Amino acid sequence: MKFYSTKRIAPDVELKEAVITGLPSDNGLYMPEKIRKLDDDFIEGISDLDFPELAFRVADRLLEECIPTVALRDIVFDAINFEAPLVKLNDNLHCLELFHGPSLAFKDFGARFMARIMSYFMKEESQKLTILVATSGDTGGAVAKGFYETDIDVVILYPSGKISDLQEKQLTTLGKNITALEIQGTFDDCQKLVKTAFLDQSLRNQMFISSANSINIARLIPQSFYYFRAMAQLEDNKTPVCCTVPSGNFGNLTAGLIARKMGLPIGHFVAAVNSNDVFPQYLSTNVYQPKPSVPTLSNAMDVGAPSNLQRIQDLYGSKGSDIAKRISSWSYDDASTRKGIQEMYEKFGYVACPHTAVGYLGMKQHLKEHPDQQGIILSTAHPAKFIDIVEEALGQKVELPDALAELVDKQKDSIVMSTDYDPFREYLLSRSLVS
């Protein structure tokens, strides 16, 4: 199995190079050359498999002997050691809870798998690997937890003042091999710094760098697992299914599209976004017009130039109108998000984070137009990670889980940096000299 660039200029590579380099030299994104369908018998029997076994079978089919079977099984079973329960809200509406991992966000699936697959590939390398990751909220904490106390250095870039206090402490209080850079800008500025570093051949000649953002194909592979797990838990396997994905950089949605291409019977997707509405505008106008991101209550979705659009276009073509046949998208502002949090609690007794509330609003709109379908909302983060927002919306206290309560009194340790590339580059080179 080879992996190609969505720009079709850089040469095809093996999985190891796709994972370790992260980004092709032509600034595209890596995709598997084949996405083979799973057998119908397998799809029909997924409810009989536990989550780790199901995840392994999907990974084995998708990666096609890129990693020996025994090693891949070990990687998957070690990474996917927590559940993704499907919570029934009513007869045709469910929440897939993806926040039962160590950082309490869906990014744990990708980060834990990636840490283990990178460690596997780096066993025979003498040079130290440094991971660069930009975060708009939850990625940073998940990557910090996933790679903590490994032999891989991690540098996390996050936008100053634009993530919640608990999100910030998840990535600034670990120390050891985890370093946090507090960038005086937006998530898009953080992502631009990371991408520029990957395209800087002079820098890459001097240090070994890779990415843990969803631009890395190793992040998308495990995110496809929980779509299979969701369908395995549905009681009704006759009614057509739509999945609503709270979306920012669109890696989560792209993983669902890959699962669908592998034969998972998801009829439609909804990309629910906040006020950063580049994607729904693109679907309706056929014009992709990236713009600076604006801060919202659902900060992990504050992306004005979604990287994974390249992969979606690779799957479905460059016209927004063609993509819209398979994916719907609507935008919701902060006032609507607050109402979504309130409505989910009033109707279902369900306490949701702001991102999940945006997903609920998208699903509500879709089911209004398609009442003959059933919906799965991806619940992407524990509501306590956004405790101030959720408590204000509901007018009541939200209990902090132990994993967050222990962070409250910890002091953050970050390095403040501008959005200019040169100081960032100099900092990275200074790290390489020390190591």
Image (cartoon, rainbow, N blue to C red):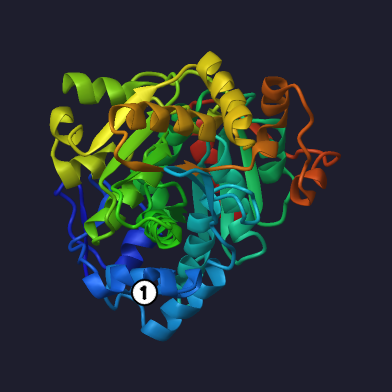
Which residue is depicted at the point 13% across and 39% down? 317
Q: Nearer the viewer, residue 76 or 225?
A: 225
Which residue is depicted at the point 44% across and 61% down? 229
In the rendered view of the protein, which quadrant contains the C terminus?
bottom right
In the rendered view of the protein, which quadrant contains the N terminus?
bottom left
Give the percent coordinates (x, y) of residue 206: 44, 54
Image position of 69 with respect to 171: above or below? below
Report which quarter residue 17 is drawn in: bottom left
Kindly identify which residue carries mark 1: 57
Q: Nearer the viewer, residue 103 or 427?
A: 103
Which residue is depicted at the point 41% across and 29% down? 364
Give the percent coordinates (x, y) of residue 396: 77, 26
Observer able to see residue 200? no
> In this image, 269 relative to 346: left or right?
left
Give the percent coordinates (x, y) of residue 32: 23, 60
Label 1 crowd (10 A; few <14 / some 14-19 / many >=20): many
Give the percent coordinates (x, y) of residue 105: 58, 47
Report which quarter residue 397 is drawn in: top right
Give the residue furthest to the top. Answer: 335
Q: Name the residue type under label 1.
A: Arg
Report which quarter residue 170 is drawn in: top right
Q: Nearer the viewer, residue 428 or 54?
A: 54
SS at mark 1 in the image? helix
> In this image, 56 relative to 379: left or right?
left
Q: Nearer the viewer, residue 424 or 379?
A: 379
